[in-house]
């Protein structure tokens, strides 16, 4: 099976070719893709490259996958569609749902649900595992996610994200009490060289900017609104952890398990503002705090 991947997410720019393939398709190990590249089963912009090739935005990769052919099937999983037009949709992803399939999990993902809801009306720039997915939310982060119905819209939205023309705000409950009512976290973020699934503050990382505003203080926690000025992988989680205020229950970035247990990090994408594709119309979407946030807030309020 041959498929095409296109580098549209700025978080993928700068990745090695073998790591990008492992991260993008999720169907085989890194060593499998290293072997494919060596055997010239991978083309980058119609040219054979080494495994260490560093990707650039806009690169087009053709993968001739001979050993794996995992089928991703539509599933009738209810999803909340908050906005839809002829080119895109915005859905409310629940906490606990993985965005796209992996070799280990080919069912019950958001992509399975999207295939049932929209059929073939989904972009495929990022391969069959990521049909329609322009940007991602972690499995345990809930909230607003944009879906592209075709490749032209996918490229349009990816360009808007790259140029900071889409406003994304989040709600989170962080460990500890913030002194300032608002502020900016400005540290570059890069991939952890020992663990590529994890991000770190790194001098050679990409510029990353997060604005925060305190919504409410509690004895040992702070309820925050966060405005992403850049869109790095795990940006909010890494930035808050870097100032010793990790998100509650974010075990990957040092918070540990809080007294109120939830499905990991208490984080929600709750606000989006963007221009309707190929139009000057402005779309603004805002949703209420999810059940995970409400559960923790109720507990914290009861202790005041």
Image (cartoon, rainbow, N blue to C red):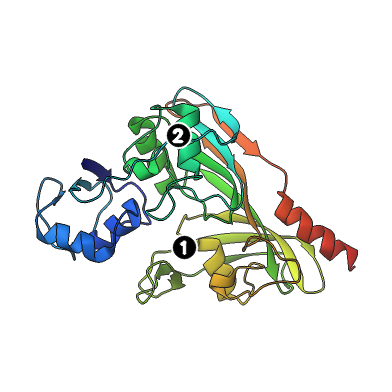
Task: Say which of 216 and 12 sits in front.
Answer: 12
Residue 121 location (% of width, % of height): 40, 27
Residue 90 location (% of width, % of height): 54, 35
- Left or right? Give the position of 12 relative to 145: left
The residue carrying pointer 1 sits among few (fewer than 14), some (14 to 19) or many (20 or more) residues within 10 Å by Cα, namely many
Q: Quadrant of residue 239?
A: bottom right
Task: Look at the image and tell me whether residue 15 can be seen.
Answer: no
Q: Residue at x 50, y 62 (%)?
A: 235
Along the polypeptide, which appears first: circle 2 or circle 1?
2
The residue where tag 1 is placed is 208
Name the image quarter holding the C terminus: bottom right
Point out the residue furthest to the top here. Answer: 86
Task: Look at the image and tell me whether residue 47 can be seen.
Answer: yes
- Left or right? Give the position of 29 relative to 239: left
In terms of secondary structure, where does tag 2 sit?
loop
Q: Residue at x 23, y 66 (%)?
A: 31
Q: CA distance from mark 2 to mark 1?
A: 36 Å
Name the image quarter holding the N terminus: top left
Residue 20 location (% of width, % of height): 29, 58
Looking at the image, how many numbered discs can be counted on the residues?
2
Q: Is residue 198 above or below residue 73?
A: below
- Left or right? Give the position of 238 relative to 265: left
In terms of secondary structure, where does tag 1 sit?
loop
Task: Say which of 193 and 77 sits in front.
Answer: 77
Query: Which disc is residue 250 wearing?
Result: none
Query: Which disc is residue 74 wearing?
Result: 2
The residue carrying pointer 2 sits among few (fewer than 14), some (14 to 19) or many (20 or more) residues within 10 Å by Cα, namely some
């Amino acid at each position: 099976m041959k498929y095409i991947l296109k580098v549209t997410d700025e978080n993928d720019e700068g990745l090695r070719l073998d790591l990008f393939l492992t991260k993008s398709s999720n169907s085989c190990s890194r060593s499998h893709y290293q072997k494919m590249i060596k055997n010239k089963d991978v083309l980058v912009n119609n040219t054979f490259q080494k495994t260490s090739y560093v990707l650039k935005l806009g690169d087009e990769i053709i993968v001739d996958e001979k050993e794996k052919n995992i089928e991703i099937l539509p599933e009738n999983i209810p999803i909340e569609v908050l906005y839809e037009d002829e080119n895109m949709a915005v859905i409310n992803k629940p906490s606990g749902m993985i965005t796209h399939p992996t070799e280990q999990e080919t069912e019950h993902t958001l992509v399975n649900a999207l295939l049932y809801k929209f059929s073939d009306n989904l972009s495929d720039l990022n391969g069959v595992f990521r049909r329609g997915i322009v940007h991602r939310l972690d499995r345990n982060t809930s909230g607003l996610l944009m879906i592209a119905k075709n490749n032209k819209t996918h490229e349009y939205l990816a360009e808007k994200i790259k140029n900071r023309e889409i406003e994304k705000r989040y709600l989170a409950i962080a460990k500890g009490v913030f002194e300032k009512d608002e502020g900016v976290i400005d540290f570059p973020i890069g991939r952890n060289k020992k663990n590529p699934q994890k991000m770190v503050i790194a001098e050679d990382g990409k510029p990353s900017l997060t604005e925060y505003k305190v919504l409410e203080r509690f004895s040992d926690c702070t309820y925050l609104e966060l405005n992403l000025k850049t869109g790095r992988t795990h940006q909010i989680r890494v930035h808050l952890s870097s100032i010793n205020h990790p998100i509650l229950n974010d075990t990957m970035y040092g918070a540990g398990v809080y007294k109120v247990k939830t499905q990991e990090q208490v984080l929600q994408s709750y606000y989006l503002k963007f221009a309707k594709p190929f139009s000057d119309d402005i779309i603004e979407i805002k949703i209420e705090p999810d059940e995970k946030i409400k559960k923790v807030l109720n507990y914290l309020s009861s202790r005041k």
